[in-house]
Amino acid sequence: MPDSPDAITEFEARIAAGETIEPKDWMPDRYRKQLIRMMSQHAHSEVVGMLPEGNWITRAPTLRRKMGLLAKVQDEAGHGLYIYCGTETLGVGRAELVDQLLTGKAKYSSIFNYPTLTWADIGAIGWFVDGAAIVNQTMLAKASYGPYARAMVRICKEENFHKRQGYEIMATLAAGTPEQKRMAQDAVNRWWWPSLMMFGPSDKDSPNSAELTRWGVKRKGNDELRQRFVNLTVAQAVAIDLKLPDPELRPDPATGDWHFGPIDWDEFSRVVHGDGPLNRERLAARRQAHSDGEWVREAASAYAAKHTAAAAPAAA
Ligand code: FAQ
């Protein structure tokens, strides 16, 4: 049965009054579907996002760097779990969502389809990718759906640590030998534009933004957040003497923003539709991990079933 217009009006009045929507509250079917879509894509991104950095755990240059990277990758797994738990409050199970990822039906962030070729890429991911994630997720911490917003608060705290470790890696390399500085600059050159693409298509081409904004899930558009990220990052690059690879980058006195050049939306579209540098490898790695973990899931379910049965009162 379609949602009644009165119920939708009442729901939108709650959103307009700044109320938080909780799992047992009434919500339009479309709101639930949009949240499941966006939150599950987000959770998948956190989990697939472990792969590019996981690639460097065995080759981190020092024990301190290895410990930092291990902790970061583990945090990303935790972020995926919080968000999958959030989607469960909307009535969809994690197994179903993971299946959508593994069968290629669900999206995950385009950024994780790029390779990590050198140690400097780990710095660039922390600085740019976590930096972009913080800008996007600080906004989502005010989203109208309570479980998602609350997950974002904790996630943003952890992403701040991630960003700092990435920036510190870049600052160290940029102040190192000429070869280290070249490596840092090369990573900046390769990660800058894909990081801008993380924010999604321009608002005019974003089919979901209007609805998500009306329902208070998105509090700002993709373009505004992207601009905010550029504005914040320019000064950070200057501070460590690395150059952002955009000849059009210049301050715009009329707006106070940094003007940046055109984004290659064809590349974005290719990557989102499965034809990026590493899409196939990323999905293959997730499928392998899922299959390798089968025995763990079986053991955990058997343990839970045994203990649930033991705790149940004996039949009369
Ligand atoms: N990649 O109408 P819109 C992280 C899709 S977490 C792939 O604008 P929406 C932490 C979009 O899904 C990174 N697909 O969509 C970390 C839609 O397709 P659909 C992930 C993209 O939802 C760091 C279509 O294009 N963060 O980095 C992308 O309103 C380091 C039209 O787009 C989140 O997921 C993209 N970049 O806005 C982890 C944050 N952009 O579903 C490990 C939550 C757009 O209609 C290591 N999500 N698409 O078929 C969001 O804020 C939003 O979903 C957007 C997209 C802004 C990503």
Image: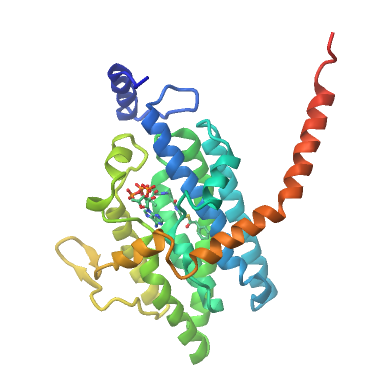
In the image, farthest residue toward the top: 316
The residue located at (58%, 63%) in the rendering is: 51
Q: Is residue 92 above or below residue 128?
A: above
Can see residue 73? yes
Is residue 190 or residue 30 the one in the foreground?
A: 30
Q: Is residue 72 visible?
A: no
Coloration mode: rainbow
* Residue situated furthest front in the rendering: 103
| Residue at image location 33% in from the left, 77% down from the top | 245
Nearer to me, 43 or 221: 43
> Where is the N terminus found, in terms of image quarters?
top left
- Where in the figure is residue 47, as x and y percent of width and height? 57, 54
Q: Position of residue 109 (x, y in %)?
A: 45, 57
Quadrant in the picture for residue 285: bottom right
Q: What is the x, y in percent for residue 232?
A: 35, 63
Residue placed furthest toward the bottom: 178
Left or right position of 200 against 157 = left
Choose top left, top right, bottom left or bottom right for residue 3: top left
Query: Residue shown at 76%/41% (left/top)?
Result: 300
